[in-house]
Amino acid sequence: MRVAKYSANGNDFVIFHANEKAERYDLAKEICHRQEGIGADGLIVVVPHAEYDFEWEFYNSDGSHADMCGNGSRACAHYAYNNNLAPAKMSFLTGAGIINAEVTDNTPRSGMVLSELTPPEIIDDSIEFNGHNWWLINTGVPHLVRFTENIEAFDIEEARELRYVYNANVNVMHVVDGNLRVRTYERGVEDETLACGTGMAASFYRAYKEGKVQNNIEVYPTSGDTLYLGVNERTITFKGRVKKTFETEWET
Ligand SMILES: N[C@@H](CCC[C@H](N)C(=O)O)C(=O)O
């Protein structure tokens, strides 16, 4: 089976396409394993759909399903376009709903991809934990977000505790010159990742709602890359470069 490895600003994925949907938890764990597999934060399988350009299956590296993945949606759009599975402007079905994406500045190895995420929903804006105010926001998957003045001191153990209490990903953000730095602990990877799209979107949404940033800003994840986020009437737009790092045969 031919698979492609992608990096979307440090959040990395293995992607392949198949003729039909299946339960691929074990394959996800095997392929994503950092020492014994290819190594990735997630596995994406592109399958045909009657109404949309395609549908995806998304798995975290521990084999769990997730309804949505912002960075994965951009990597997947580049993969689908370059494998003639979708036009440059496409719509595809995820567990969270329909995602519209557009690939520009394309080469076989990289592209600029804009993904329009599903409408954000503030689930709770008054969570108090260890003296901090957290918001729980669903941007396709649930994220806890709070502000910090010292982003270097992101407490991974506290994040891990919160992740299990709320069954959510956990983010801290710092406003820098009107833009945002964000660090994310991801459930399903069970550690900090180099970038998380829905996490950056949830952080941006809270900062925007509280008037701490304007619309259309730059967001910097742990990888140090630059992503572009904005909000329109209903959805959050999320744009940045993705890279195909290699392709290989995977023996099943
Ligand atoms: N990295 C993703 C989010 C993937 C799903 C998440 N780990 C969960 O289980 O909720 C992104 O870029 O949004």
Image (cartoon, rainbow, N blue to C red):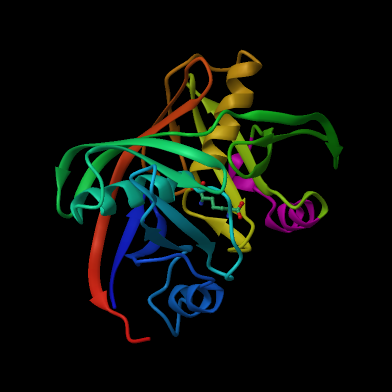
Residue 178 in magenta?
no
Residue drawn at x 47%, y 38% is 98
> Which image quadrant for residue 138?
top right
Q: Position of residue 121 (x, y in %)?
A: 66, 29
Query: Which residue is depicted at the point 68% across and 56% down?
Result: 156
**Tag count:** 0
Q: Is residue 227 visible?
A: no
Horizontally, residue 61 falls left or right of residue 6, namely right
Could you tell whether 171 is left or right of 117 in the image?
right
Asked whether residue 151 is drawn in magenta, I would say: yes
Most foreground residue, 113 or 159: 113
- The answer to whether any part of residue 22 appears in the image is yes
User: Which residues, given as a range, are shown in magenta?
Assistant: 150-164
Q: Residue at x 46, y 76 (%)?
A: 34
Rendered location of residue 42, percent (x, y)? 47, 63
The image position of residue 144, as x and y in percent, is 70, 40
Q: Residue at x 49, y 27 (%)?
A: 236
Q: Quadrant of residue 87?
A: top left
Q: Is residue 204 above or below residue 66?
A: above
Main secondary structure of the magenta stretch: helix
Image x and y of residue 225, in percent: 36, 42
Question: Taking 176 as reference, is 131 above or below it?
Answer: below
